[in-house]
Image (tube, rainbow, N blue to C red):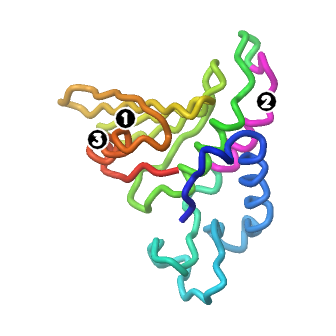
Amino acid sequence: MYRFDAGTAGAAGLAAVAALTSMYSTPAMSAPLDVVKPTAKQATASTSEQPSSKAGDVQYELWPDASRRLLFLASLDEDHDGEGALRPSESAIASAVLFVRQLPYYASDPVVGVDGDGNAVVEFHDVDELGQVIFRGDDGVEAFYSREGLQPVSFEGKINDQDFAAKFVKTFGIRFFV
């Protein structure tokens, strides 16, 4: 699995993510999953197996459309919505793409977009739950979680903040790492 280094964010980080997408994506009809990280070791994982995070295994991307949409959104210009929206932040997009690519198989399908401030947004919708993660261009990240019958929770921090990651696991039930 990838471990995001904040030092690679920005144009270089986005270029690396785009290069990985073009190098390792498969034709749409050939396989339901795109390879995210090939390894030198011969892996036996098939598209019907659950993804593994053991060193040496191939990690498959479960939501390639969400990653591709984020990469497309990175190309939008300022005022793309006709209402004064800022140009999407390259570092925010790169962080969101890496986050989506590392989501476990049991996560809800992510819905991605950008907001008017140029931040990348990843949302999770379930029958009675709503989760939202906003990646800012300054390596900041905000999280919101709401479940029917419970008090909504929101918190924020930095991408590599261990306290944020601990709150994220406790609230969303999935690990936060980019």
Question: Which mark is in front, 2 or 1?
Answer: 2
x, y (%) of residue 53? 46, 71
Disc 1 is placed on an element classified as strand
Q: Earlier in the sequence, mark 3 or mark 1?
A: 1
Q: Are marks 3 and 2 in contact (CB under 8 Å)?
A: no
Q: In the image, what residue occupies the spot 74% across and 68% down?
A: 24
On residue 17, the disc is none
Instruction: Give, as a three-letter code, the residue at label 3.
Output: Thr
Residue 83 left/right relative to 139: right
Q: Are marks 2 and 1 in contact (CB under 8 Å)?
A: no
Q: Earlier in the sequence, mark 2 or mark 1?
A: 2
Question: Which mark is in front, 3 or 1?
Answer: 3
Disc 3 is placed on an element classified as helix
Q: In the image, what residue occupies the spot 41% across and 53% down?
A: 107
The answer to whether 107 is drawn above or below residue 35 in the figure is above
Give the magenta-colored segment's residue range: 67-80
Q: Earlier in the sequence, mark 3 or mark 2?
A: 2
x, y (%) of residue 11? 78, 41
On residue 171, the disc is 3
In the rendered image, which residue does mark 1 sit on? 130
In the rendered image, which residue does mark 2 sit on? 76
Instruction: Give, as a three-letter code, the residue at label 2.
Output: Leu
Pick the front one: 167 or 86? 167
Residue 70 falls inside the magenta stretch:
yes
Position of the N terminus by quadrant: bottom right
x, y (%) of residue 131? 39, 36
Q: In the image, what residue occupies the spot 71% across and 19% down?
A: 86
Q: Residues within 10 Å of mark 3 (few under 14, many from 20)?
A: some
The answer to whether 65 is drawn above or below residue 90 in the figure is below
Q: In the image, what residue occupies the spot 47% across and 51% down?
A: 177
x, y (%) of residue 132? 44, 34
